[in-house]
Amino acid sequence: MTMNRMSKCLLNVIMSLGMIFSFLGRVSGQEKTILNVVYEFKHVRDLANPEPPYVADMVLSLAKNTSRYTTIYVYNNNKPALLAQQEQLQSTASSSATTVVGGLGLLVNNGGVFLREETLKDLKEQALTQYTFLGNKTYLLNSKIPDINWKITKDKKELGGYSCQKALGDYAGRTYEAWFTTDLPFQNGPWKLGGLPGLILEARDLKEEVQFILKEITRNTDPEETTETFQLYPQLAIPVNAKELNRLEHSFIKDPIGVLNAVFPDTQVAIMNMEDPGNRSLDKIEEYNPLELD
């Protein structure tokens, strides 16, 4: 191969890699986090046994044009400073974060199996990216940010020291009551909710089967923290559509041990309850109540 042809090939490779990294940077949200909002998320997963509901603290990390919404467990275990410490420890010791002695560990709380997922928004592109970890696989759902037709009311109240106004809107088979503030320079909200002229600090469906309750707002002081995904290998996530993801979530939430046993038939599953460490039981869901009804 001549030098000219080699140079052209090298240039093509460099340009291709540049396009790939540019694309990855755009969709993963390479913006510095400005604000972190913590919500208490409540979900009545089982209509036959509504108590206790599934409860998890969630973190909405906000940048100018992008955001990331995930569990506080995932967030705290992926902070840049903590990851740097872990890298130092791993240089002298091995890690087995997903296994326990004698088998697999299944994280649960009193409301059911713990769900590891991320919802990323790109407001400029109106793009929504969702990563969901079920069993031993990560699934990827790409879609548009929902266009919710909100009706803003005159009702007002204060949340966390911020003046808020009430709005009502329908999304995925549920009618949500949302309280948003214009005191903060964001037009966003927890999970897939948004589209109001402010930041949603509280939301619940009218049946109170799904709730997002404000717990804390903090300004980010870590210059390394961005709103990009925490997925180590996002390119390996399995693309699915909304219908497929709902079916997979339903199967896993309803019978997570059965799903794991189907993948690892000769492996024992150890239940680890984050709220009640002594509780090794997990009730099966009788009447599953998905977040998105349609």
Image (cartoon, helix red, strand yellow):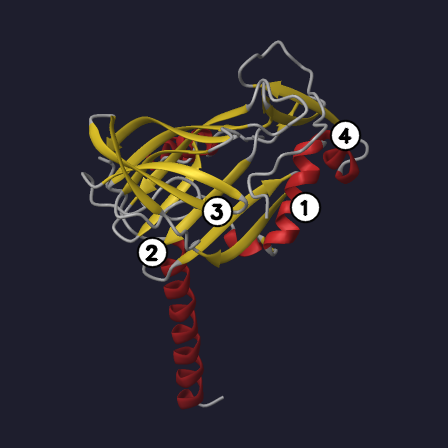
The numbered mark at residue 267 is 4
Question: Residue shown at 40%/63% (left/top)?
Answer: 21
The numbered mark at residue 171 is 3
Q: Earlier in the sequence, mark 4 or mark 1?
A: 1
Secondary structure type for disc 2: loop
Query: Would you name the residue on which mark 2 appears?
Result: 123
Q: Is residue 262 left or right of residue 61?
A: right
Secondary structure type for disc 4: loop
Distance from disc 4 to disc 2, alpha carbons, whole Å, reads 43 Å
In the rendered view, tell whether residue 13 sits above or below residue 214.
Answer: below
Q: Earlier in the sequence, mark 4 or mark 2?
A: 2
Distance from disc 4 to disc 3, alpha carbons, whole Å, reads 40 Å
Q: Extreme left residue here? A: 183
Residue type, mark 2 in image: Leu
Q: Earlier in the sequence, mark 2 or mark 3?
A: 2
Badge nearest the viewer, 4 or 3: 3
Residue type, mark 1 in image: Arg
